[in-house]
Amino acid sequence: MSVSVRIPTILRTYTGGSAEVTGEGATLRDVLQKLDSDYPGIGARILDESGKIRRFVNVYVGEEDVRFAEGLDTATPDGAQISIIPAVAGG
């Protein structure tokens, strides 16, 4: 399945400055593995050492927060938009 992945500014150094890249996979896990294969190092910024989505990173497939769906096993249908959004702290 071909999907588009929106890359936040802080991770664009991995994608050569691209704000959006094409990904492939039937699940979010597959897409992130392919993303890390295509852009080495980006996966470690999204996933922690145990392979889970980092606490301060939000990932959406379409409008759905994957934490409230199937997590990394969330389906990524053809044409889906995946958004990676790091949490922002302020004071």
Image: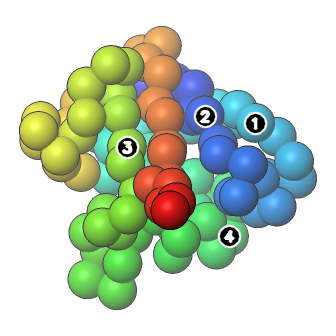
Q: Earlier in the sequence, mark 1 or mark 2?
A: 2
Residue under pointer 2: 6
- How far, Cα to Cα, is label 1 from label 3? 15 Å
* Residue with the most extreme bottom position: 49
- How far, Cα to Cα, is label 4 from label 3? 19 Å
* Camera sees residue 26: no
Q: Is residue 76 above or below residue 29?
A: above
- How far, Cα to Cα, is label 2 from label 4? 17 Å
Q: Position of residue 78 (x, y in %)?
A: 42, 16
* Camera sees residue 70: yes
What is the number of the mark on residue 19? 1
Q: Position of residue 6 (x, y in %)?
A: 60, 34
- Which one is closest to the eye, mark 4 or mark 1? 1
Q: Earlier in the sequence, mark 4 or mark 3?
A: 4
Residue under pointer 4: 40
Residue at image location 49% in from the left, 45% down from the top: 85
Circle 4/circle 1 CB separation < 8 Å = no
* Residue with the most extreme top position: 79
Q: Earlier in the sequence, mark 1 or mark 3?
A: 1
Q: Is residue 34 above or below residue 44?
A: above
- Local packing at callout 4 (Cα closer than 10 Å; few below 14, some 14-19, many 20+) is few
- Local packing at callout 3 (Cα closer than 10 Å; few below 14, some 14-19, many 20+) is many
What is the number of the mark on residue 59? 3
Q: What is the secondary structure assignment of the residue under circle 1?
A: loop
Residue at image location 88% in from the left, 53% down from the top: 16
